[in-house]
Image (cartoon, grey):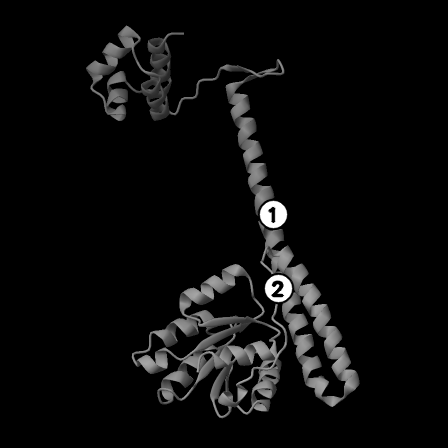
Amino acid sequence: MKTAETIHIACSEMGITKADLAKRMGMLPSSLYRKLARESMTFEELQKCLDVMGVTIAFDLKFPDGKVRSSQANHEMLLERMDMMETELEAAKKAANFHEKSLRDLRIELNNAVGYAELGGRCGAKAEEYLEKMQAVLANMERMIACALGETVIEEPEKEEPVDIETLRGRRVLLVDDNALNREVMREILVGHELLVEEAGNGHEALVAVKEHDPGYYHFVLMDIEMPLMDGYESTMRIRKLPNRIRANVPIIALTAYAGQEDRKRATDVGVDDFLAKPINTARLLSCLIKFL
């Protein structure tokens, strides 16, 4: 079937004239007439013409295995497969999100378990032995979780006391965490090294505390990341935008169970000075504080 005949049939079925078709295509009617008469329409022009009318031309497709299928049937089959793949992809994304959340929740629960063990570790040798075992279990689980989440495992340094820890005595720390247990554990560690500790239960409370006290009142801010009302990222960004430069430049160290490379990059981008993964290595924490004095 010639192009002119195909277009004529399509126009008849659609109830439009060739002049109307030419206008919809952005052509002069005379140009369309001439092209049809000479069979000189390019493939692109023919495709545009058919698209304007919503016409699909079916033709046979021969596949390498010798089977023949009409283009229309093949098109419909591909659309069905695409719909199926999109459904499967959406289900896979939901499953991945569920597993990722489960792993992150497990990481937090392990961190809490070590926190309880640290508090109990001050009660006797058996408790200290239990704490060591819990920390070993956590280290192994942390590697497995990081691998499952596609994170790079960052090995903790050896647990050695900083040599110049005296310089930390009397320094004031704002401890920001919505988990009371985490605050209790951290407070015990910090107070045990003669630092002054004040607490905030979320990022908004931290922002208010920094704004309301004199510039330089806090020597450090230990900032949790995942918190209600205002998370650590938002709180850090707002502190960095405070008009007083001394307040805005207070050292902020992120303490979080979310220790992936993306988490670290985002923390750095919003202005966090350093990043420590929970459960906290005491020696590393103290060394981190000292370097900002």
Q: 268 or 210: nearer the eye?
A: 268
Q: CA distance from mark 2 to mark 1?
A: 20 Å
Q: Earlier in the sequence, mark 2 or mark 1?
A: 1
Q: Amino acid at mark 1?
A: Ala
- The part of the image, by quadrant, that contains residue 32 is top left
- Residue 254 drawn at (x, y percent): 50, 73
Q: Is residue 5 left or right of residue 111?
A: left
Residue 74 can be seen, yes or no: yes
- The residue beneath circle 1 is 91
Q: Which residue is mark 2?
A: 104
Please determine whether, in this image, residue 4 is positioned above or below residue 120: above
* Identity of the residue drawn at 61% across and 53% down: 96
In front of the other: label 2 or label 1? 2
138 lies left or right of 201: right
Say what secondary structure mark 2 lies in: helix
Disc 2 crowd rating (10 Å Cα; few below 14, some 14-19, many 20+) is: some
User: In the image, what residue occupies the spot 57% across and 46% down?
Assistant: 90
**Rendered residue at 38%/76% (across/down):** 239
Binning the other alpha carbons within 10 Å of mark 1 as few (below 14), some (14 to 19) or many (20 upward) gives few
- For badge 2, the amino acid type reads Arg
User: Where's residue 266, x and y in %?
Assistant: 46, 63
Find out whether the residues at labels 2 and 1 contact each other: C-beta distance under 8 Å: no
The image shows residue 214 at horizontal and vertical percentages of 36, 89
One can see residue 228 in this view: no
* Figure quadrant of the N terminus: top left
Residue 217, quarter of the rendered image: bottom left
The residue at the far front in this view is 163
Image-quadrant location for residue 123: bottom right
Residue 180, above or below 106: below
- Residue drawn at 60 percent across, 85 percent down: 189
